[in-house]
Image (tube, helix red, strand yellow):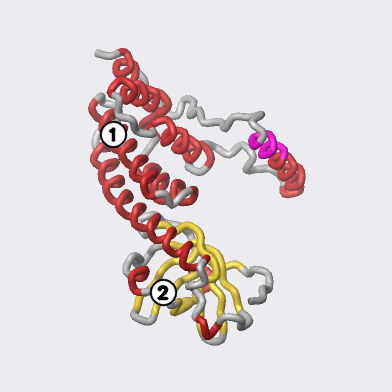
Amino acid sequence: MPASISAMMSTTTVQSAMDAYIRHTDMEGHGMPVEQCFEMLSQYLIHYSDLFNDADGDEDVGDYPDWEEGLDEHMSALLEGDLEPVGDLGNLLLEELDPEHIRDFLGWFVLRETNDEELLQSYAAVLHGWVEFVHRHGGWPDGEYPAFVSALDQVIPASIRVSRLSRVLFHLVRSGGGVPPRLRGHRFSRFVEGHAQASEITESGLYFSFHNQGEVIGPVSLPAPILSMIEVGDVFDLELGLRGDTWVMVDVGPVYPSCVYVEVEEYQGLEKLS
């Protein structure tokens, strides 16, 4: 039995399971971006999951300027190459990882960073291979393996779909396609921006729900091929503007699939002119 596999079987940390799979894929010559995927997964687990305590969570609000200044200095050092991102998972046990962490990683964190469909598919292949590798060598608690596979089978096609959608919407908005010609040059009377959930899709367009406002906004007119890519429940990071009696898409960022919950909200922005 290879040393990497026996080492993984005798330990139960996420880090050692990742390291063992990296060595395994190097020996097998798969050519997948395993280390890149795991580095990104580690960043998600450390900074955005519920697996690590935030040591700064109880700081006094009055310390915010000092925190902000420290963050600026840290980012400057990072950009200048003086610091390396911290990605060591330490003693995080494998049994503490659950399918929802993998679902949120692919269906939220990666999509927040990129809409590159090829990269998503590569990461999906890495995670499928890793989950299978851990299962073959007894790394998951009883019953966990099917749940991991089910989560991946659900989130992968959904993430690929919305990555295509966000890319298409980005080009539509940047090309001016989000604003009908008859409305160009008119002033906006209202802006709504933030995370909005697709609540209804009709022939006239797309309706968005900002839950904490108790208001449905729309329809936002979009070409039929784009509407066909959207599913009710998808969450958009966007800005909508009201011109006359028509809502138009002013800006758009990532889109997240309905299988990953994202709290939606509306917040007031600055007054803007067309």
The amino acid at mark 1 is Gly
Residue at image position (28%, 34%) is 129
What's the residue at 64%, 37% (across, down)?
79
Nearer to me, 102 or 211: 102
Q: Residues within 10 Å of mark 2 (few under 14, many from 20)?
A: many
> Which quadrant would residue 261 be assigned to in this image?
bottom left
Q: Could you give the CA–CA distance between mark 2 and mark 1, rounded to whole angstroms?
A: 38 Å
Q: Is residue 193 magenta?
A: no
Q: Quadrant of the N terminus?
A: top left
Magenta residues, start to end: 73-79
Q: What secondary structure is marked by label 2? A: loop
Answer yes or no: is residue 83 visible: yes
| Residue underneath mark 1 | 129
Q: Which residue is mark 2?
A: 222
Q: Is residue 77 highlighted in magenta? A: yes
**Looking at the image, is mark 2 or mark 1 earlier in the sequence?**
1
| Residue 265 in view of the camera | no
Where is residue 143 drawn, in percent x and y? 24, 37
Q: Main secondary structure of the magenta part?
A: helix
Q: How many marks?
A: 2
